[in-house]
Amino acid sequence: MTMPSVETNAASPRPASRSPLPLAAVVIACALGLGLLVPVLVSSQLALTLMTQAVISAVLATGIGFMIRQNGLTSFGHAAFYGLAAYGVALNGKFGLMPTELAIILAIVLPSILAFVAGLGIVRLPPLAFSMLTLAVAQSFHEIFLRWRDLANGDDGMAVRLPSTLFGMDIAVFQQPATMFVVCWIVLVLIIGGLWLIARSRFGLLTIAIRENEERARYIGFETVVPRAIIYGVSAAVGAIGGVLFVLYNAFVTPGVLHWSLSGEALVMAVIGGARAIWGPALGSVIFFMFKDAAGDLTEHWPAIIGVTLIVVTVLLPHGVSGLLSSMVAKLKGKAR
Amino acid sequence: MIQIINGLVYGSFLYLLSVGLVLIFGLRRVTNFAHGGLFMLGAYISYAVAAYLGFWTGMVVSVVALAALGVLLDRFVFRPLAHEDAIVTLLVTFGLLFVVEDLVRTIWGKDFLTVAPPQILSGVVPMFGATFPVYRLFVIAVALAVAAGLAIWLRSSRVGLYVRASSVDPVTTGMQGVDTDRLSALVVAIGTGLAGLSGTIAGPLLALSSSMGGYIIIDCFVVVVTGGLTSFTGVFIAALLIGQVHNLGIVFVPELASMLPLAIMALVLTLRPQGLAGAGK
């Protein structure tokens, strides 16, 4: 029995290849400019803090979404890469092994290599087994950092020692919401742009073909495991970038950054936003945070709210909010003609 | 030696919970993420009932209530989503887990609760030069009874035959004239009833908290994947194996204990991608 992949019927494989590159460049430039305007327009420190958190979570959600989009596999343990990157930077600060810039790069590269190597084995699993496995692995990393008190101070978390300048910028840049928002925003836009380029490349199309029918792709003569493992590595790298941003901003880590509820939350964001569009999960993250803010007094029942939202969105909007927007735009275009 | 029996206790407990997942997976081809939530709900229900009517009544009420919930779950969640992708149901039950956790937190609060074992099981017995709580032996006995009961039911009754057939190939079984919808209502009820049973049993064994379900479900997933998703024998062996490894890990290498079951799973999946007793994809 073969399990149908996510979005089987929806996948008229029509990725972004229709929109030409120059247009994309304009969109990216606009998005970057928009981000620069935000700190000018928004003066409330609280709102900026919230937005910075939203963008950092958006990076993680984008990583999960890309995996769903290209591989049809749902990771329930993406916080592992996020948390390992955060702890990587933190532990380097504690032991002073290498310059922080180098540590940051390694904190992104090593988890991706880990994901790639693990991916060679696990992308072949049935989707359900993959989900359960990623969850279990991520949770065991959480347990290690929780129990190994000598290494990372367990549940109490550890303050992270950071140098006074980083990549030639004052460290304060990374810790003030107004400036960090811009940094995170730029990173997010560049990631989405980069993933978009990957998705529309020949390689990106190949992985979609494999997602749709692995057996057929293999019969045509393609190697089908390595491409999927590469996608897993890329999506892990994106998650790790999120973790680095998190640790630079907060200068504090707890095992919570590895907990499965963080993976779960980011997955919920990706589902709400819709993973069919690369920008969907990021949109989902923004909606998630706005919603959380609006819930206000109800935050005590926040888990139930998330739960119900997740159920409603999965059942009624299988392509999430971004899918809804896309189909609305398509309808409008149809009418204009 | 005592540690090995302790591992057996944990393994038995994992089996009770995981076999419910396997039953549901067999019929509906879905992973019930809410299983941990139901288990926790079962624990709290029996806690509440046991306070007034005693442990045994609590157990019966919890099993019956959870089985009834299972019928509803099958009718209103699994059946409507049967033609959707398996991941859809996974996400929906994931959402249900959040809702159940919040519900329990609202009713019973955030504090840890403990349940005393019933009078008759509260003593200790001498064993291998030490003493061992009777209650823990009772856990093993229950698991063995459930395993034996399920095995007899699956092997010798007509319904059991249908369940086994359906676990191998639900579509063909349906085409042969078996009403898989009715069958799965029954099987899901048994699965969730077992979650209620293991919840009750967990009461005196672990502390009750609203996050206990999300926690234990991860170990169960490891067991189910290792066992091969649809195999009743596989899940039994895997549960005992993982329970043992987990427990010995906690005793000897506490920092890495959580990694060991995964290492076992990774090893099994590398050698046999279909799991210990799985029949391929």
Image (cartoon, helix red, strand yellow):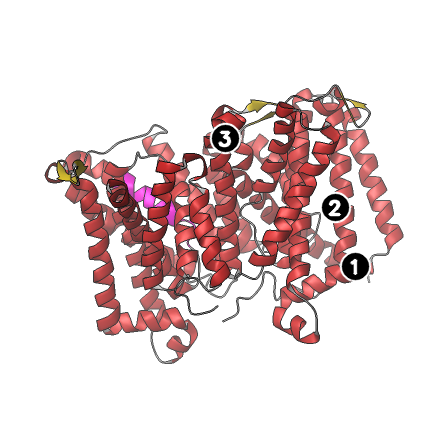
Q: Are marks 2 and 3 in contact (CB under 8 Å)?
A: no
Of the image marks 2 and 3, the number of the one nearer the N terminus: 2
* Labels 2 and 3 share a subunit: yes
Observer-nearest residue: A140 or B158?
A140
Of the image marks 2 and 1, the number of the one nearer the N terminus: 2
Q: Circle 3: is it few (<14), some (14-19), or many (20+) Cα within 10 Å?
A: few
Residue labelled with disc 3: A299
Left or right: B20 with respect to B47? right
Among the 4 quarters of the image, the one containing residue B173: bottom left
Please state which amino acid type lies under the numbered disc 3. Thr
Q: Circle 1: is it few (<14), some (14-19), or many (20+) Cα within 10 Å?
A: some
Q: CA distance from mark 2 to mark 1?
A: 14 Å
Residue A115 makes an appearance in the image: yes
- Residue at image point 48% right, 31% down: A146
Left or right: A77 with respect to B105? right
Kindly identify which numbered label has been placed on residue A192.
Answer: 2
Per the image, is A38 magenta? Answer: no
| Residue A24: image location, x then y, percent | 84, 50
Please state which amino acid type lies under the numbered disc 2. Ile
| Residue B113: image location, x then y, percent | 29, 30
In this picture, which residue range is highlighted in magenta?
A: B32-45
What chain does badge 3 belong to?
Answer: A
Per the image, is B35 magenta? Answer: yes
Residue labelled with disc 1: A201
